[in-house]
Image (tube, rainbow, N blue to C red):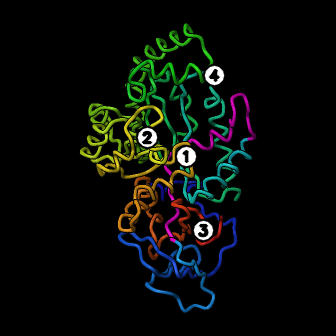
Amino acid sequence: MLDSAPGPLREERKPFAMAEETVFTNARVVGPDSVVAGTVVVRGADIAAVEDGPARHASALDLDGDYLIPGLVELHTDNLEKHVVPRPGVRWPTAAAAVAHDAQVVAAGITTVFDALVVGDIRADSARRRDLVDMAETTSRAQAAGMLRAEHFLHMRCEVGCANLFELYQPFVDHPLVGLVSVMDHTPGQRQFTDDRQYRAYYKDKWGTTDAEMEAFIAGQKEVAHRHAGPNRARVAALCRARGLPLASHDDATEAHIDEAAGLGVALAEFPTTLGAARAARARGLKVIAGAPNLVRGGSHSGNVSVQELAEAGLVDILSSDYMPVSLLHGAFLIAGSGEGSLPAAIAAVSLTPARAAGLDDRGEIAPGLAADLVRVRIVEALPLVRAVWRRGARIG
């Protein structure tokens, strides 16, 4: 699907110097099934060989026993939006924000990132609505100009309760960077906000509204969503089927939510809020995406299921950094625990599995013939530290 997309999506970009051959040795290479002390040979943009033991190559780069893992693949991060509006009422220049966002994800070991942009935010006057097209187009131009070091795609997050959702989505129907779409519904009384009190507590202080204003807003949201959420959800699903785009659901709380998602052709369940929803997703063949910040913090900030609990139940397929890029690698090592036996599966949850879920079959694993997207990691005081990053054989961090 993504390999046939037009324009800059599949275009080769080589903004940094690339060595003809680079040999990494004395590394703990994290492969799909095991961690081996060995050597990785890169020729041009691709991995040429993975070998046991040290290299005899005189110019080999000695990694001093550090881990060498695949470049991380992030399917859902709000980080670009945070850089465009770093504080309420502050609007940062978009190109500068995109470059800063890119630098942050690369520093976190992320070499492929799906920038999540909200289509149809719950407030008509929101910065997300105002800046939507500009963020997408500026990111596209910056990438084509070689200003960005990671490879960027777009993840369009469709708020199905929005009355004019498809008017807002129109510029992205055939956008070459769109690689993932999700359907979400932040109507109070369900999913993330099953209790209206949670909704009030979250948004009242955030927006500085009075009690009366918040009550009127909640009533209005429920009425609009009642009319539009179902038809919009079905229409988004039809659009994704027609264009071969992977579709995700968001904040599923019940088995009925999962049944609805599966019926629409959803492949990914993002951030299920309960253990029951995660189990239902797995039973229906959906990949479960869990939030790495929840894991690093030791629980959900909004009272939803703990990702540690999901991991212990074997229900985490993919981790996402959501709002904190640095949490992705940290979360993977937390899932792996203290031994190396479970590290390959944990690293796959932030590299191979998300890559395949997005239709990217040229990355996500340290194997001959795949892209040389690599990250050097050292554990210091139980914290995984990114020491160097390469994308397609070029040093980018």
Identify the amino acid type marked 3.
Answer: Trp
Disc 4 vs disc 1: Cβ atoms closer than 8 Å? Answer: no
- Residue at the disc numbered 4: 125
Q: Is residue 249 above or below residue 393?
A: above
Q: Name the residue located 26 percent from the left edge and 40 percent from the top edge.
A: 280
**Disc 4 vs disc 3: which is toward the camera?**
3
At label 2, which amino acid type do we have?
Answer: Gly
Q: Which residue position holds label 2? A: 299
Q: Label 3, label 2: how many angstroms apart (C-alpha)?
A: 32 Å
- Of mark 4 and mark 3, the one earlier in the sequence is 4
Question: Disc 2 or 1, which lies upstream in sequence?
Answer: 1
C-alpha distance separating marks 4 and 2: 32 Å
Identify the residue position indicated by label 1 in the image: 154
Q: Which mark is residue 390?
A: 3
Instruction: In this rendered view, identify the residue nearer to me: 26 or 24.
Output: 26
Q: Secondary structure at mark 2?
A: loop
Can residue 72 be found in the magenta stretch?
A: yes
* Three-letter residue code for mark 4: Asp
For the residues marked 2 and 1, what is the alpha-carbon distance in whole angstroms?
28 Å
Specify start and end residues of the magenta stretch as a single range: 67-93
123 relative to 151, above or below: above
Residue displayed at 24% across by 45% down = 283
Q: Image check: 182 left or right of 14?
A: left
